[in-house]
């Protein structure tokens, strides 16, 4: 069961994000809503964030990575049909190449400027090459 619960009209999500870098850039998924997300998803009950990161990479890209570098914890507040309060644990991982399934794309620090990335702070991390962020708060009401 995903760590996602409705509390007093606000949905609380606990997620993991993997900034997966290849030789060509970072991997993102097209959501079909006009923006892109990095690889990741909700953490399941009794699952660590590292276990969730490994599971998400396997489910979404059919790859296995053992080494992750902690980047930040993001408190993300947004509206998408309902109010969301999301706690997102962000990791960095690297591999030379990856075969991307449908709806996944690679963007680097140059071509990412023309793409809508959610959460926005991820885009800024890549453009500015500042990955050791610690604690980030983002209020993005779209």
Image (cartoon, rainbow, N blue to C red):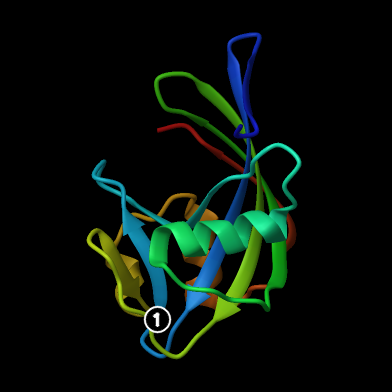
Name the quadrant of the C terminus: top left
Q: Is residue 37 above or below residue 66?
A: above
Out of 18 and 65, give the one closest to the viewer. 65
Res 132 visible: no
Rendering coords of residue 62 (x, y %): 42, 68
Task: Give the residue pinned by disc 1.
Answer: 25
Q: Is residue 142 left or right of residue 101?
A: right
Question: What residue is drawn where x is 64% and y is 66%?
Answer: 91
Q: Position of residue 120 (x, y in %)?
A: 48, 53
Which residue is outermost to the top? 8
Which quarter of the picture shows residue 28? bottom left
**Residue 82: in sight, yes or no?**
yes
Residue found 53% across the figure and 21% down from its top: 83
- Image x and y of residue 114, in percent: 27, 65
Residue at position x 58%, y 76% in the image:
65
Q: Judge the density around disc 1: few (<14), some (14-19), many (≥20) Cα neighbours within 10 Å.
A: many
Provide the secondary structure element on which disc 1 rests: loop
- Total of numbered circles in the picture? 1
Is residue 74 shown above or below 71? Answer: above
């Amino acid at each position: 069961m995903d760590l996602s619960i409705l509390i007093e009209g606000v949905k609380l999500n606990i997620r993991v994000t993997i900034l997966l870098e290849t030789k060509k850039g970072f991997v993102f998924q097209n959501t079909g809503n006009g923006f892109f997300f990095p690889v990741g998803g909700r953490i399941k009950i009794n699952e660590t964030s590292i276990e969730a990161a490994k599971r998400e990479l396997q489910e979404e890209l059919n790859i296995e990575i053992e080494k992750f570098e902690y980047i930040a914890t993001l408190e993300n507040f947004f509206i998408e049909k309902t109010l969301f309060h999301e706690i997102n644990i962000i990791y960095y991982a690297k591999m030379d190449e990856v075969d991307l399934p449908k709806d996944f794309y690679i963007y680097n620090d140059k071509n990412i400027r023309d793409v809508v990335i959610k959460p926005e702070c991820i885009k800024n991390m890549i453009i500015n090459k500042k990955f050791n962020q610690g604690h980030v708060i983002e209020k993005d009401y779209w």
